[in-house]
Image (cartoon, rainbow, N blue to C red):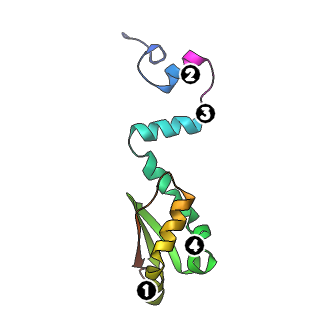
Amino acid sequence: MMGASPMKRTGKGLRTEQRRSGKPVALGSVVDKILEDHGVLDQVRRMSVLEDWPALVGEAVARVTHARSVDDTVLIVEVRSSAWLMELNMMKGDFVRRVNEHMPDTPIERIVFVQAETE
């Protein structure tokens, strides 16, 4: 087969950097570089709030909410009842602050509380 083998390429890439230094590259840095190259690193980092939501808001709020998704810089949170929906909307600024203190490098701009669908 004609052409240079992948290991002999001289373009940008982690294999080239690793080959030059002779040192292994941490998997986390490889993943971060790929995500950054594709323009999604910040969004992937923002998604961590979905898992961290219960710890950020406390047990009482976590019982009646579910952090559903992150759409760019907007966190979408499902709420179990309309009464809680009204209450949490009044506390929205505090939740945005808590989330942004937890992940200051990838802040969210706002939280949208939505009524959870009933089963």
Which segment did they paint magenta?
18-26
Q: Mark 2–mark 4 contact, CB under 8 Å?
A: no
Judge the density around disc 2: few (<14), some (14-19), many (≥20) Cα neighbours within 10 Å: few
Per the model, the C-alpha gap separating discs 2 and 4 is: 42 Å
Judge the density around disc 3: few (<14), some (14-19), many (≥20) Cα neighbours within 10 Å: few
Judge the density around disc 1: few (<14), some (14-19), many (≥20) Cα neighbours within 10 Å: few
Residue at image point 58% right, 63% down = 52
Per the model, the C-alpha gap separating discs 1 and 2 is: 54 Å
* Residue that label 1 marks: 86
Q: Nearer the viewer, mark 2 or mark 4?
A: 4
Q: Earlier in the sequence, mark 2 or mark 4?
A: 2
Q: Mark 3–mark 1 contact, CB under 8 Å?
A: no
Residue 31, how many percent across, how many down?
Answer: 51, 39
* Residue that label 2 marks: 18
* Residue that label 3 marks: 26
Give the amino acid at mark 4: Val
Q: Is 65 in front, or is 6?
A: 65
